[in-house]
Amino acid sequence: MVASALKTVPQAAGTEINIQTVSHHFDLEGAPLPVLDDITFDIEPGSFVALLGPSGCGKSTLLRLIAGLDHPAQGQIQVAGEKVADPDPSRILVFQDPTLFPWRNVRANVALGLEAQGTLKSEGHRVDEAIRLVGLTGFDKAYPHQLSGGMAQRVALARALVNRPNVLLLDEPLGKLDSLTRMTMQTELVRLWQQSGLTAVLVTHDVEEALYLAQRVIVFGPRPARIVADLQVDLPYPRHRGDPRLAELRHQALGHLGLDSSW
Amino acid sequence: MASIDIEAEIRAEPPARAPVQRVTLLAALSWFAAAAILLLWQDLTFQPLVRELALIWGAVGVALVALGLAGSRLGRVGRWTALRAPWLLAIGIGMAVWTVLTAKTGLLPQPFFPTPQALLEVFIYDWPKILHSASFSVWLLAKGFFFGALAGFAIGVGMGWSRAVSYWATPLLRYIGPLPATAWLPLAFFIFPTSGSASVFLIAFSTAFPVAVLTWSGIASVNRDYYEIARTLGASPLFLITRVAIPAALPHVFVGLFMGLSTSFAVLVVAEMLGVEAGLGWYLQWAQGWAAYANMYAALFVMAAMCSGLITLLFRIRDRVLVWQKGVVRW
Ligand SMILES: Nc1ncnc2c1ncn2[C@@H]1O[C@H](COP(=O)(O)OP(=O)(O)OP(=O)(O)O)[C@@H](O)[C@H]1O
Ligand SMILES: [Mg+2]
């Protein structure tokens, strides 16, 4: 059922992301709080990159800059060769909380993007496809308060995917789920990414999650964030959680985070 | 297993004897008693319509006997009477006590406390006037409330959305808003061409203030993330107002509408008493001029029905519009 749904989804070509000497700071009670310090890296089109770093280092801030919700104080970000100035449905950010609109049922939540872009009439079938894609067929009419945490997060994912974005920005989307649901959703994320061909950028605290999902893990140091490591995860999909190579990479990553003594 | 056995037993039992509703029968008794007191006990002074009223109360008693004997066989009606039987009993007793205190013993002095017969007389002979007054009041209120709610909503949305509107409107709202609308009454009757339009203005004014304040605070308290999500999905500013801000603020708006409706009742009655030559408020005033106390009670009775009916209507509308809130908030 899922496979047949996927065939009808055309491949959305993932686009390239260039982050060029980006620095950013916030004003905290009058004093500037530096958050990002001269960050430069490129993300290949269609790749899956994880951003790892200590809490409060500026990972979410970087995603918001890529999404166009904020503007970097210095440097610039290009997506598909164009400077990011404003939010755009081709780059969609999925928040840590599903943040569904409580007055809309599942279907209407997923349809939000098409409605906002005025294409719901002609492209309405994409809503059903997206709902099927995340395995929520039959829950179209349910309101957000009637969903479990994992289901709500899947609706948030469908709400993003229905727009066929070129870039999917995921800010700890699985952070609040129980470990079992989390593992299932991780596998689903890989499947969705592989089958849609989009560029995925995932922020996470979880070293295992980053290594299990991504082709490349960028490790940030404490605030203001600087890149301390750039690890290639040279393992084919589907991966096995017990793979010795993953354990080795985990040791490396924890070392860069200053936590290797705990391993 | 046990539950299955019980179900089988229930099914096996013949459905012939549905349980009789005892409280409903008791209620019937109270209505018969009221009718008997009315008929058999001599009135202090001459009262109209004694037999007619006794007939009505007796009929209520007969109906209750039928309902009580039929019991739960009547389905929805049966359940309703079962639920309301204590009230039906209390009202029957109330009728009897009222009759005794007014018509029979005069413990409550006439004419300030009319007898039940006198009240029935008002409804029988004056109902066209009461009905006309009530419909006039509802229409006046509807016009004022509609315009007031619309204006309040627009002001609230504007204040919640635009810095400039908020800058100019906030001090005005703070300074003028808390003033009771009735304080404008003398001026309004002077400025407006008709007392009707003046009343519509006053009712609208009293409605607009709470609706504006609550709409504004509702829009101000909308989760910022909703806007950001909508923006990344390609929403225009208009979409953000109509599809994000307003639906998210609607629960607050309804609180404002309830407050507005309650204050508009007060303004309506005062306006009708002081200037408009129609409506229930005017009817009250007119009845007072004739010392027609029974008419005043009748008007109060109809007015209460009108106000509670309108509040109930607004509740229904809210439940319909805010279905999604069930389960999010307990009312
Ligand atoms: N709007 C804001 N105003 C002021 N300071 C902010 C703002 N947003 C974030 N910050 C600060 O910037 C720093 C980085 O925040 P950010 O949310 O990017 O961290 P993070 O790496 O995502 O952390 P976590 O992993 O805990 O989510 C924090 O110290 C935070 O206090
Ligand atoms: Mg974060």
Image: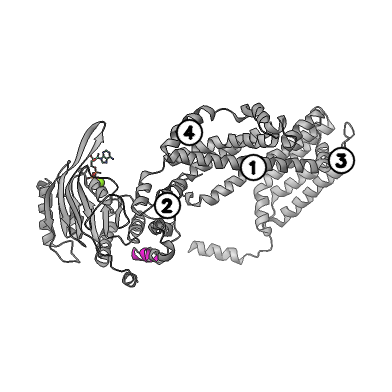
Task: Name the one closer to the observer, B161 or A228.
Answer: B161
Camera-side mark, 4 or 3: 4
Would residue A17 appear left or right of A177 to someone viewing this image? left
- Judging by the rendered image, the residue that carries numbered circle 1 is B143
- Judged by its main secondary structure, the magenta piece is helix
- Judging by the rendered image, the residue that carries numbered circle 3 is B50
Tag of residue B169? 4
- Judging by the rendered image, the residue that carries numbered circle 2 is A145
CA–CA distance between discs 1 and 4?
24 Å
CA–CA distance between discs 3 and 2?
59 Å
Q: Chain of mark 3?
A: B
CA–CA distance between discs 4 and 3?
61 Å
Task: Please indicate, yes or no, whether residue A168 appears anywhere in the rendered image.
Answer: yes
CA–CA distance between discs 2 and 1?
37 Å
Q: Are marks 1 and 4 on the same chain?
A: yes
Q: Residues within 10 Å of mark 2 (few under 14, many from 20)?
A: some
